[in-house]
Image: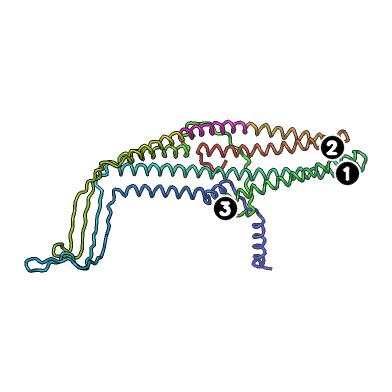
């Protein structure tokens, strides 16, 4: 048989081997998908675009405006007059009027400046808030990713525990049959096996819910991807509280918001200032004896508010109080940020130290379980000691795995709080 005859078979084997390999999903891919499909980010981006349009709106005070006004009327009877024997038309029966008006502000006396300043500062606040939302999406994706890995490890531990319980039950039956153990050992092993089955079901439920939350965040169905485990843990970052606080986008948004409010105070205070503008009209209408068919006029228009009933001052006072509110909220946000960062720094150090403790505890529990198993097999102890030692081993394994991923989760929270855009540990 020629080589070409084997090509379809080789292709079939290759495709089947590729299909058998599970698709892997990394933390970085998870975070990128979360950013792409986040409703919170879509809302934040829309808010940022809205703020940009408000800036454009503010600058329209300096732009000219052009308006056209048209009308047709009928008056019955028409107005006519006789002058030196001639019949003059004052108002015809049918008439039309078209007015093209151009308006251009020349000097706004602060209105344009403060309106644009308030809009631009508000835009900066929205952009900073958008960046903060982005960090929070990255944090949420990382937390869900680590929680899914943790629940998977807990399922594996529960499965190993159930297998050990099943093996011990069979061993107990053999020892009782041989007269080397009490019959009650079988009942204890059966109860321990039932408890392990219950723990496995609970672990599987938690794992299923964790994957459900993860792929709900990604806005797509779960295709059975295998998450890449995190073996190497980074060291806790060196604390730098002032730099971290300066980077925080939520604090920047708060400060920009207060500055925008101050600009709105100035805008409210200049509403009573004069306004100088250019006005030009071109009128095309029905010609009469006293009115030409077309007329063009150009002039300067100066408006000086004299008294507005106190509305400008009331609005300025309201704006000042808004500034005070935002400043108070900004101060409170900075205090909360300092507390959050300090707490996370302390928690990171404690969780990193706990890693070594849980690892040593697991090694001790493994040795204790090995000795208890040998003692039981040689008739030196009951299976109570064995079951207790293996329960302690399972607890130690769970503690070690939990410490591993809880450290990573705390690190993800710290990176968000310190405004560190890091996708991988």
Quarter-of-image position of residue 177? top right
- Going 58% across and 54% down the picture, which residue do you hit? 220
Q: Which residues are magenta?
A: 330-352
Residue 70 vertical placement versus 199 (above, below)? below
Q: Position of residue 224 (x, y in %)?
A: 64, 53
Between the residue at mark 1 and the residue at mark 3, the CA separation in whole angstroms equals 51 Å
Element type at mark 3 = loop
What is the C-alpha distance between the residues marked 2 and 3?
49 Å
User: Residue 172 or 12: which is nearer the viewer?
Assistant: 172
- Residue furthest to the left: 84
Asked if residue 267 shows in the view, the reply is no
Identify the image quadrant of the N terminus. Answer: bottom right
Most common secondary structure along the magenta stretch: helix
Q: What residue is disc 3 on?
A: 219
Left or right? Give the position of 168 relative to 277. right
Q: Residue furthest right?
A: 179
């Amino acid at each position: 048989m020629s080589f070409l005859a084997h090509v379809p078979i080789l292709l079939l084997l290759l495709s089947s081997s590729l299909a058998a390999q599970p698709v892997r999903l990394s933390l970085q891919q998870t975070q990128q998908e979360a950013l792409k499909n986040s409703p919170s980010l879509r809302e934040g981006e829309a808010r940022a675009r809205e703020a940009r349009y408000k800036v454009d709106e503010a600058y329209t005070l300096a732009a000219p405006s052009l308006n056209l006004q048209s009308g047709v009327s009928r008056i019955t009877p028409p107005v006519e007059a006789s002058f030196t024997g001639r019949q003059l038309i004052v108002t015809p029966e049918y008439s039309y009027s078209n007015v093209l008006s151009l308006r251009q502000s020349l000097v706004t006396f602060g209105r344009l400046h403060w309106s644009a300043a308030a809009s631009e500062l508000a835009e900066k606040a929205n952009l900073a808030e958008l960046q903060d939302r982005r960090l929070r999406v990255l944090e949420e994706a990382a937390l869900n990713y680590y929680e899914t890995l943790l629940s998977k490890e807990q399922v594996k531990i529960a499965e190993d525990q159930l297998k050990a319980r099943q093996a011990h039950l069979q061993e107990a039956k053999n020892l009782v049959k041989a007269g080397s153990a009490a019959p009650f050992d079988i009942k204890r092993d059966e109860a321990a096996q039932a408890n392990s089955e219950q723990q496995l079901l609970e672990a599987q439920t938690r794992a299923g819910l964790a994957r459900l939350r993860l792929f709900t965040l990604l806005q797509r169905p779960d295709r059975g991807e295998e998450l890449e485990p995190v073996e190497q843990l980074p060291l806790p970052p060196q604390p730098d509280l002032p730099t971290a606080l300066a980077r925080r986008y939520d604090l920047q948004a708060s400060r920009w918001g207060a500055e925008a409010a101050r600009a709105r105070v100035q805008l409210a205070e200049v509403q009573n200032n004069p306004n100088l503008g250019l006005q030009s009209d071109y009128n095309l209408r029905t010609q009469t004896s006293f009115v030409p068919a077309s007329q063009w006029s150009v002039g300067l228009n100066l408006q000086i508010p004299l008294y507005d009933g106190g509305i400008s001052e009331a609005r300025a006072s309201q704006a000042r109080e808004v500034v005070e509110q935002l400043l108070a909220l900004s101060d409170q946000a900075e205090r909360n940020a300092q507390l959050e960062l300090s707490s996370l720094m302390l928690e990171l150090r404690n969780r990193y130290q706990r890693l070594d403790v849980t690892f040593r505890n697991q090694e001790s529990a493994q040795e204790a379980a090995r000795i208890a198993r040998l003692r039981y097999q040689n008739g030196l102890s009951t299976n109570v000691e064995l079951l207790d030692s293996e329960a302690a081993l399972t607890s130690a394994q769970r503690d070690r795995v939990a410490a591993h991923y809880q450290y990573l989760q705390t690190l993800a929270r710290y990176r968000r709080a310190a405004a560190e855009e890091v996708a991988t540990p």
